[in-house]
Amino acid sequence: MSALAFNRDGGVLAAANESGSAELWSVAGQTGTQFDVPAAAAGQPIWALAFSDVGELAMADSDGEAYLYQVDSGALTASVVGALRDPDSGDTPAGDAGISALAFGPDGNVLVTGDTNGNAYLWRVG
């Protein structure tokens, strides 16, 4: 696993790995289901996950995009609702590029992303 995040009430855990797959897990039921990663990101290492307080999930990987999902925590499903292209993601010493960190603001209307060049960007997403 390369990225983990709990939703607001702690009932759902999002987990992702460097092979490019991601899952949602019910903490109480200890069951999980894989959710679709956009075709452009398939097979890319997933480096960061973050839940907003309103139930959206952001996922960032080495393709230079942050993907936004609407999560149905009861059904353990996630649907892509948008993507944000990093203006200046660059190469790391390992040869990867992309967004390596992200976090939602307290109201869920702002997402901050950090790229491999050391830049941070604020995005309006709400």
Image (tube, rainbow, N blue to C red):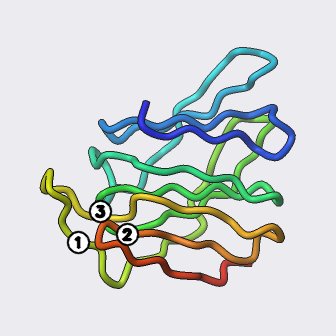
Identify the residue position indicated by label 1 in the image: 90
Identify the residue position indicated by label 2 in the image: 115
Mark 2 or mark 3: which comes first in sequence?
Answer: 3
Mark 1 or mark 3: which comes first in sequence?
Answer: 3
The kind of secondary structure element at disc 2 is strand
Furthest toward the right, the residue is 9
Q: Check the picture and name the quadrant holding the N terminus.
A: top left
What residue appears at the point 40 percent right and 37 percent down from the top-left corner? 21
For mark 1, does the 10 Å Cα neighbourhood hold few (<14), some (14 to 19), or many (20 or more) residues? some
The kind of secondary structure element at disc 3 is loop
Residue placed most toward the observer, 75 or 109: 109
From this view, report whether residue 79 is shown above or below residue 119. above
Cα gap from disc 1 to disc 3, whole angstroms: 10 Å
Q: Which mark is drawn over residue 14?
A: none
Residue 32: x %, y % from top left: 62, 23
For mark 2, does the 10 Å Cα neighbourhood hold few (<14), some (14 to 19), or many (20 or more) residues? many
The quadrant in which residue 96 appears is: bottom left
Cβ atoms under marks 1 and 2 closer than 8 Å: yes
Amino acid type at mark 1: Gly
What residue appears at the point 78 percent right and 16 percent down from the top-left corner? 29
Amino acid type at mark 3: Asp
Q: Is residue 90 left or right of residue 113?
A: left
Q: Which mark is drawn over residue 63?
A: 3
Residue placed most toward the observer, 68 or 116: 116
For mark 3, does the 10 Å Cα neighbourhood hold few (<14), some (14 to 19), or many (20 or more) residues? many
